[in-house]
Image (cartoon, helix red, strand yellow):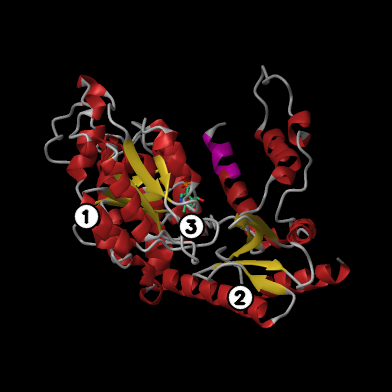
Amino acid sequence: MDRAEFRRYGHEFIDWLADYFDHIEQYPVRSEVAPGAILSVLPDTPPMQPESMEAVFSDFRKVIMPGITHWQHPGWFAYFPANNSPVSVLAELLTAGLGSQCMLWQTSPAAAELEERMMEWLRDMLDLPRGMTGVIQDTASTATLCALLSARETATGHTANQKGIDVPLRVYVTSETHSSIEKGVKIAGFGRENLVMVRTGEDLGMCPVDLDRAVKKDIDEGRHPACVVATLGTTSSMAMDPVDAIGDVCRKHNIWLHVDAAFAGTAAIHPDHRWFMKGVEKADSFVFNPHKWMLTNFDCSAYFVKDPEILLRTLSIQPEYLRTSADRQVKNYRDWGIQLGRRFRALKLWFVIRSYGIEGIRNMVERHIDLARKFSGWIDAGSNFERMAPQHLSLVCFRYNPGNLTESELERINKNLLERLNATGKVYLTHTTLNGIYTLRLSVGQRNTDVRHVNMVWELLNEIVKDI
Ligand code: PLP
């Protein structure tokens, strides 16, 4: 592609994206293609000769678009939000164009210094302790792996990196904790058998008394408690582990406390909705994802630590070819995470925070929470549906239950209800199980979702159940 073509297609693609955003409601939210449909029309072999951009872009529209599930559709109520915004898309374009590898300060000083300042902004926006230091990770899964590795090194006096683990190191979670923690426990060498499930209460949050009991039992039996992962806003039901009380248990037994607020963290930007952060100053590490609810397109995960020295001691590498004369004065973020190569992610944060302002982000959070409350109110007021968990922030867990059906009938009917709702193409919700019961979830968080879309879910649900 020559420069003139680049310019022309650059304009055309932005026009196409602007039209896509304008007309996104014409697409079914969830892709309707059958498994294998896209693969079957993709050629088996790459082209030997260059193809025109005309042909490639035309295939993008014809072949790829039908297989896209539209996370930016205002009828998006599935899983969790991954909302982007026009400004973050433009910043990503600049990031791609600059093509910088931001592994060392020297490989792009502006990227390193902007990252440092953005993490300070985010820390203050969430009202995290001022002593915490942040770094951008690709995902919460990676941030949590860094926390687990730091906990492992702390628990072994920084010998595990050198010698491996020779005592059982225990990690405490609940059945509601995100699956990335189990994955991290396996990767970091703790072993799946050392992942301890602590009982949850009725609100699906971790019971600190049970945590304390489990820790004492492990100590008595010769195992070594290393890390507790507390979740603020579980993926299934937005349950909140009581970090304040959990922090006391961790301090008493000298255990690393990692807080996973990947989903809910954005709500803490709003002072009226940060109640769940109580005790967060007791955490050794904390993660939240601007790439979920904070208008910043994937990937961008904000990881904060109380003591960066532990992270650096755990992950630092010093090959000669990466040494620079500035090393003593600067942050080289290659030592703050798993990967060496790093994208310039701070740029999109800068664009988003400056163009929305803290007020703009707070207004969005307020609007989404308000919509979830509205829906929750309709569920509670009617007789055909029931709420399945406390309604926190922007998530509502519910099911159809007219009161005269067995549990297995309820499960079958709710599965059918969800499938028929999603088949309308107008909205997309997903499910979970809570205490073994099949549950539907309404997760509000797409940038353009308004009361019309939440109304639509409610109307469609009521229409479909009449027919069931
Ligand atoms: N933790 C929680 C509570 C989540 O909801 C999620 C994503 O759903 C994750 C962790 C994993 O996030 P990521 O995709 O950034 O690794």
The residue where tag 1 is placed is 251
Is the residue at mark 3 in contact range of ligand 1, meaning its CB lies under 8 Å from it?
Answer: yes
From the viewer's side, name the closer residue of 44 and 91. 44
Q: Residues in magenta? A: 3-9
- Residue in the image at 52% along x and 73% along y: 369
Q: Badge 1: few (under 14), some or many (20 or more) residues near its Cα, within 10 Å?
A: few
Residue 401 belongs to the span the image colors magenta: no
The residue where tag 3 is placed is 234
Question: Amino acid type of disc 2?
Answer: Ser
Image position of 62 with respect to 319: above or below: below
Quadrant where the C terminus is found in the figure? bottom right
Image position of 417 with respect to 220: above or below: below
Image position of 358 with respect to 38: above or below: below
Instruction: Give the spatial CA distance, label 1 vs label 3.
Output: 23 Å
From the viewer's perspective, is 461 left or right of 46? right
Tell me which numbered mark, 1 or 3, is placed earlier along the sequence: 3
Q: Select label 1 or label 3 by which is in front.
A: 1
Residue 444 location (% of width, % of height) = 58, 66
Kindly state the secondary structure of the residue where label 3 is placed. Answer: loop
The residue where tag 2 is placed is 376
Secondary structure mostly taken by the magenta-highlighted segment of the chain: helix
Question: Amino acid type of disc 1?
Answer: Arg
